[in-house]
Image (tube, rainbow, N blue to C red):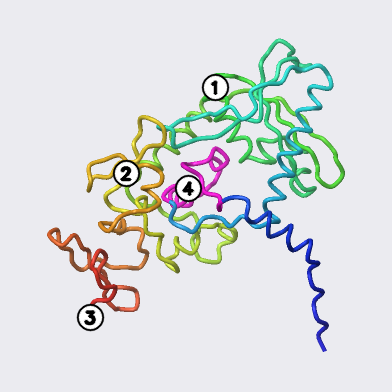
Amino acid sequence: MVPLPKPTPSTQRAVQDALESQGDDWESVGVPAGDIGVECDRAIWLAFRRASVPEKITWRKRRIFERGNIEEERLLDLLRLIGCEVWGQQDRVRAAGGHLRGKIDGQALGIKEAPKAVHIVECKSAKEEYFKPVKKHGVKIGMPKHYATFQFYMHGLGIDRVYYMMSNKNDEDLHFERVNYDFEFAARQVARIERIINMPEPPSRLCTKRDDFRGTFCRQAAVCWGEERPRVHCRSCIHSSPIMDGNAGWDCARHSKPLSLAEQDAGCPAHLFLPAMLVGYEQVDCSETDETITYRRPDGTLWTDGASQDEVA
C-alpha cells in the first residue's frame, strides 16, 4: 500500500501562498539582456512577441530569485571590504529602440589589477556543475550567455572592462575574472537582436525535431511546434509592429496609433494573427472588407480568424 504523503504544515502553506501572491507572473517588456546569448533566433522572436503564456512565478522560484539578489549584494560587499568604491546598482542599459534592455549589477573603482579603471560588475551564483567550467575555462567558454550579456552592457555604457564575480552555491568557492570589451562581438549581438525584433514573421527553428535536446527547456516550444495557438494580443497581431526609435514602443497600423503596454496586453476585436505564427495552418481565403483570414487546420477543418464564430463549415 502506497503511504499517504505528509500534509504541509499550515504555517508553511500560508507562507508559500503569501509568496505566490506577491505580484504578477513575470514577462519582459522587450528582449532582456540575459537572452542575448540564447542560441535560437526563433525562441527570442516568440518571446519578444509574447507568444506563450508568461512564466508562472511559484513560491519556490520567488525564493530562488531573492537568493540571487542576496548573493549579488554579498559579492558587491566583498569589493567594498577591500576598499573598492561601488555604485550604479540597477543602472539601465538600452538598445534597439529600447526593446533590448537590461540592468547592471553595479560599477566599481579600485579593482586591484587596474585601480584607476572603472569596471562594470557582473555578479552570479551557480551550482557546482555550472561553476566548475567557468572556473576552469573562464566565463567566455564556461558561461557564454553571461559573456554576451555583459558585453552588451559595456557596449551600451561605453565602459571597456567588466569584473565578473561568480560564487559556488555548493561550497562558497569564488571565481573572479576581468574581461575586456569586444566591440566586434558586442556590435554583432546588438545587430542580431535588432534584426530579430524587426522580422515580420518568426525565423526558422534551431531544433530539427520536437525532441531535440536543445529545446528541452524552451518555454516557446508548444507554440513553436504548433501544439498551442499563440496568445491573442497586439504583439501577435498582423497590424502591429515595434517602433525602433524611443523606449520600447509599438505601433498599430489598423488604428493608426502608438500602443501602451496595457493596450498591447489587452488587444482589440480587430486582432488577426500573424499567419506564420499559426504553425501547420494553410491560408485558403481572406476578406479585406470583413477583415478576416480563413485557414485550413492541420486536421483539415476550416477556421476563420477575425470572424464572430470560431468554426466555419
Q: Give yes or no for contact between labels 2 and 3 (Cβ–Cβ under 8 Å).
A: no
Give the percent coordinates (x, y) of residue 140. 65, 35
Q: Nearer the viewer, mark 2 or mark 4?
A: 2
Q: What type is the residue that disc 1 sits on?
A: Leu
Q: Nearer the viewer, mark 3 or mark 4?
A: 3
Which residue is under mark 3?
313
Q: Give yes or no for contact between labels 1 and 4 (Cβ–Cβ under 8 Å).
A: no
For mark 2, give the secondary structure. Answer: strand
Q: Is residue 38 above or below residue 105?
A: below
- Quarter placement of the C terminus: bottom left
**Label 2: how many residues lie within 10 Å, few (<14), some (14-19) or many (20+)?**
many
Give the percent coordinates (x, y) of residue 226. 42, 66
> Could you tell which of marks 1 and 4 lies nearer the N-terminus?
4
Which of the 4 image quadrants contains residue 51?
bottom left
Q: What type is the residue that disc 3 sits on?
A: Ala
Q: What type is the residue that disc 4 sits on?
A: Ile
Residue sitting at 47 percent across and 36 percent down? 100
The alpha-carbon separation of the residues under discs 2 and 3 comes to 33 Å
Q: Give yes or no for contact between labels 3 and 4 (Cβ–Cβ under 8 Å).
A: no
- The part of the chain drawn in magenta is 24-49
Which residue is under mark 1?
157
Which residue is under mark 4?
44
Q: Residue 241 carries which label?
A: 2
